[in-house]
Amino acid sequence: MPNAPLLRQRLAALFLAGLLLWFSPLLDRLEEAGTWLGVPVLYLYLYGVWALLIAAAAWLVIHRRD
Amino acid sequence: MIDVATGTIRAPLVVAITLGYLGLLFAIAWWADRRAARGRSISARPTVYALSLAVYCTAWTFYGSVGRAASDGIGFLPIYLGPTLIVLLWGSLLVKMVRVSKAQRITSIADFIASRYGKSQALAGLVAVIAVIGVVPYISLQLKAIAQSVGILLRYPQPQAPDPTAMPLWHDTAFLIAVLLAVFTILFGTRQLDASERHEGLVTAIAFESIVKLGAFLTVGAVMTAWLLGLIPGPEPTAVVAESTPVLLEPPLPPFQDWVAISVLAGLAVMLLPRQFQVAVVEADNEAQIRRAIWLFPLYLFLINLFVVPIAYAGLLTFAGSDIERDSFVLTLPIAFDRPWLALLVYVGGLSAASGMVIVEGIALATMVSNDLVLPVLLRHWPARAQRADIGRLLLSVRRLAIVVILLLGYLYFRIAGEAYALVGIGLISFAAVAQFAPAVIGGLYWRGGTRDGAIAGLLAGFTVWIYTLLLPSFAKSGWLPIAFQDSGIFGIEALRAQALFGLEGWHEVTHCLFWSLTANVGTFVLVSALRGPTAIEAAQASAFVDALRQHGPTAMPLWRGSAEVTELMRLISRFLGSARTAEAFAAHANARGLTSAKELPADAKTVELAENLLSGAIGGASARALVASVTQEESLGLEEVIEILDEASQVRAYSRQLEQKSHALEAATAELKAANLRLRELDRLKDDFMSSVTHELRTPLSAIRAFSEILYDDPEIELGERKRFLGILVSETERLSRLVNQVLDLAKLESGHADWQLEPLDLEPVIGQAINATEQLLRSRGIRMTRDLPLTPMEVLGDRDRLIQVMVNLLSNAAKVVPSSGGCIHIQVGRTDSSIRVCVNDNGPGIPADEREAIFEKFHQAASGGEKPVGTGLGLPICRRIIEHLAGRIWAEPPASGPGARVCFELPALAAHDR
């Protein structure tokens, strides 16, 4: 793992981003945000952040030699 | 069979599918074991590892997520969000755990914690007890899920659950499944005594189960979503929809502290549950697996949660007003939709989720029970039996028995608890139990100060609080205990109310328990650790764990002093591992130390460490240490000595790092020197070539001059005409000679940088004009037509007038030499771009072959023009190049735009208006 410390730092940054996006008090506002195309915005937000985190982690791990 | 006439699924079909599926698992495990034996491991692949981690998703996920979603909206999500986040830290956290575990041959989470705190048997036993109490009910939940799903299937086409307790024992699917899973676990989980070795077949089968459950869940999710979107027909939604769906359509966020607490709990459980530790650490093979898992495992969690809400919504629409359990929506929906094969697929998915959990949990718990509970008791109370020669086989039997007992315990608890709350809510209760390992494990990986006493006290405190605030209340809610202690506190003390400890009210019971138990756990751990400093072995192990990422491989300093005999050690080990494997391991060790056989091994710290390490893989670090101590006389090392050794080790590491850096620097310097040497040699070669070319070129005219002079000297009778011709040759050869000498001198001057340069802004037009004048005689004598194409604007460059004329004359005379004797023509073309002026000389001679265009600028290179004797000295163009390059321009040859001939161009930076 030549770039292991760097990869660890990037993933840790992603971890903090996830904390902020999922566990901030701002989440309360989405509760009232209603629906979009019949789906509550809260679901879209939680699952959307989830997909983004996974995609970012995959990108970081796969392109770690760059 | 699915009976079309009566519309039922018959029991034999369910039995056949169940047995068929389990048979398939056996086949896959057997096949993977065979492949691994041939050195082509399946389970070492990163994807298989990531899939095996999905044993995290049990029947509780498969059936329970939809139930939770239907009851309280998004409350199920934190159980998967927490792991997704914690996995992002695995690059450090899990890699550390895996490295230590591989170096110390750790077999279970109990072994891991015990090893960290000085290989304490008491600590290992405590962890094993907590794990068994916390997790066995969770096994019951899986068996219950299987039994319930069979019951529901057999009621097809009625989407109802029968009373599972009403069935006789031998018709009880849960019991049969438990027995079959015990057989599977024993066959593929207890092949060898060394529990630190990987279980290839088992892990591959688990990965396969993960695919099956995900596939089944996605299928039913897709069907339900299609129905919700109106794409496929289904039952009419019931009328009383409005009151049950708001929880899904306007999902309320759980209270913030619950949202966080459940996430933390799940994030810890995904590493600390015995089965998760088993697949993530013990079964790990390489770090590429962990890197893949960092994104693939969360992706799995994401996918298996994708359709939870649509299925819950479909269930609420379909079953509103009926008493169908929400936990069974996943299975009852296909039945209500009259899709028997989909129902069977869901059943298989649930079976795979439940069986995977039971198998891995079974092997993990059995390893702990046999190594950390049974073996210490055996050694202490039946020392005679422990002296048996083949205690290894005895221990393996104990482990197999433990599997059977654990699974039967799970079954019994399921029969006793039934529908009681103590079983239904066990998922999070279980998580909270194993969360008690977190301070000892994570603290132990990053904090050197923790001691054995601190870890034991912390675990006991946390576990006690867990029992009091979560386990006992769940018993009370099941009606097994008086509820009084919960309502009014133990002994009637208000502050001790079980789920409102010290007045902390209004929190979810799990959040409440997590807060108080971890507070008690961490507080006690830190406080008791601070009472006394670490002992020698604790300090040594702390260093091995905390510095796991700094050192590669097991390079921990062996910390042992005393007297031992190698034969004694070998006898001890062979009782567990068998004599063949023992001899093999010692011989390999001797080999690695440069000795020819195990007999020559000194009984020193390294050998004792090897013995302990070998035993650790079989019976755990704590028992291994105790056993090795029983055949050696160890002198206790003082803490100061240990710290000295550890310091030494870290100094050695620092020195070796410095050495490494220095050797890198040396390597770099060597490479530079080599390159410089190569360059010098090349220059030397060029100089030699130059010298030999020069002498060769000088000799040709000299020998001509000499030959003709000799003729003239020897023969005074030569005719006047002839004599004149010879003298003409003499004159022209002398001229050529002096031209050559001049050019060599010129080039030497240019190359050495001693040339005089008269740099001034000058217009190129007069320069070209002068050059044409200088060569006019030559051109006219050969009948060459000369054309030029000059721009009207002045072409100012910074240059040396004489030198530029020299360049032009050279190019023109070169061109004049090669054009055909009749109809030769030369064309001068001058153009300017924004920043430079380009002068090209075109001729209609034979042209320059592509591969020579660069070479003609080398010294003494002369374009071979059709085998004729080359004309010129071969120094003209090199001199031109020197001059042009000195003036910051470039010179090159290129093919002409059209037609035959050659084209040589040079380019000089134009003087901008303000430079003038």
Image (tube, coloured by chain):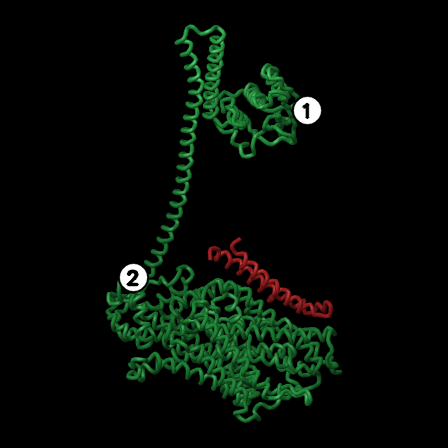
Chain colours: A red, B green
Residue B598 tag number: none
Amino acid type at circle 2 is Arg
Crowdedness of circle 2 by 10 Å Cα count: few (<14), some, many (20+)?
A: few
Residue A39 appears left or right of B441: right
**Badge 1 and badge 2 in a common chain:** yes
Name which of mark 1 and mark 2 comes first in the sequence.
2
> Percent position (x, y) of residue B603?
25, 67
In which quarter of the view is residue B172 placed?
Answer: bottom right
Q: Chain of mark 1?
A: B
In which quarter of the view is residue B820 placed?
Answer: top right
Residue B593 tag number: 2
Residue B6 appears left or right of B616: right
Please tell me whether mark 2 sits on a helix, a strand or a loop: loop
Please tell me whether mark 1 sits on a helix, a strand or a loop: loop
Label 1 vs label 2: CA separation? 84 Å
> Percent position (x, y) of residue A56?
58, 60
> Percent position (x, y) of residue A65?
51, 54
Residue B239 appears left or right of B125: right
| Residue plotted at (64% across, 24% down) | B827
Q: Decide if residue B484 is in sight here.
A: no
Residue B791 tag number: 1
| Residue plotted at (48% across, 85% down) | B179
Relative depth, front residue between B365 and B201: B201
> Percent position (x, y) of residue B521?
46, 74
The C terminus of chain B sits in image quarter:
top right
Relative depth, front residue between B134 and B510: B134
Amino acid type at circle 1 is Pro
Crowdedness of circle 1 by 10 Å Cα count: few (<14), some, many (20+)?
A: few
Assess whether mark 2 and mark 1 are in contact (beta carbons under 8 angstroms): no
Q: Decide if residue B118 is in sight here.
A: yes
